[in-house]
Amino acid sequence: MPHTNKASAPVSVDIPEFEGRYVDLGGCTVGEARAHALAEELIKFLETSEVPNGLFAADMFCDFTMPTWRLQACGVEDSVALRLAGHPGRGTVPRWRFDPTPTGFVLEVEEAWDSGGEHWTCRELFRADIGDEGITQLSVYCTGDWDAARRAEHAAAVTLIRP
């Protein structure tokens, strides 16, 4: 099926790393469905710290920006090491939003995890370019990691309209 075809019924996505997976395209293109499937695999990686097959291209580039610093990595191994240096264990992604782009997707997430006896949260925005092998370029923008004291300080100072 060409990437420009639209469909309203579940179809098989003919991509080796997603063999056997059926996706309800809901009127989106096959390219958008593939981007969504990769975004879901990225969420699995964020939650488990394990890289699903086909998620990243071997020569991927990662550009990671946090509140007061910026880091970069090339290749899957170095990019995963960059992630694990800041988030070494399992966590959850209780909220996320996916938006397809002409070259891949944008994914907004909220993460939560425990480390060093503390519960942490952060919000991140991922802009991913995708190719035949998976994510080829990943830009990450992180709010920084918030512990209980930071969340309490924020809650005392600000009333959010939406979570």
Image (tube, helix red, strand yellow):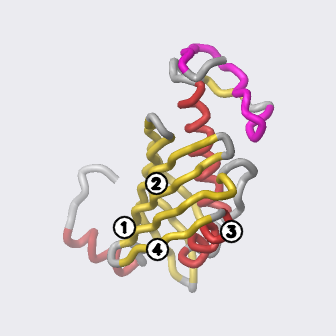
Contact, mark 4 vs mark 3 (Cβ under 8 Å) = no
Alpha carbon distance from label 4 to label 2: 14 Å
The earlier-in-sequence mark between 3 and 2 is 3
Q: CA distance from mark 1 to mark 3?
A: 24 Å
Kind of residue at disc 1: Thr
The answer to whether 59 is drawn above or below residue 80 in the figure is: above
Observer-nearest of 88 and 55:
55
Q: Which residue is mark 2?
A: 126
Mark 1 or mark 3, which has the lower sequence index?
3
The residue lying at 75 percent from left, 51 percent from top is 53
First to last magenta residue range? 4-19
The mark that comes first in sequence, 4 or 2, is: 4
State the residue position of label 3: 77
Q: Which residue is mark 4?
A: 71
Q: Residue at x 53, y 31 (%)?
A: 32
Mark whose residue sits in front, 4 or 2? 4
Identified by mark 2, the residue type is: Phe
Q: Residue sitting at 57 percent across and 45 percent down?
A: 39
- Does the magenta-highlighted stretch encompass residue 6? yes
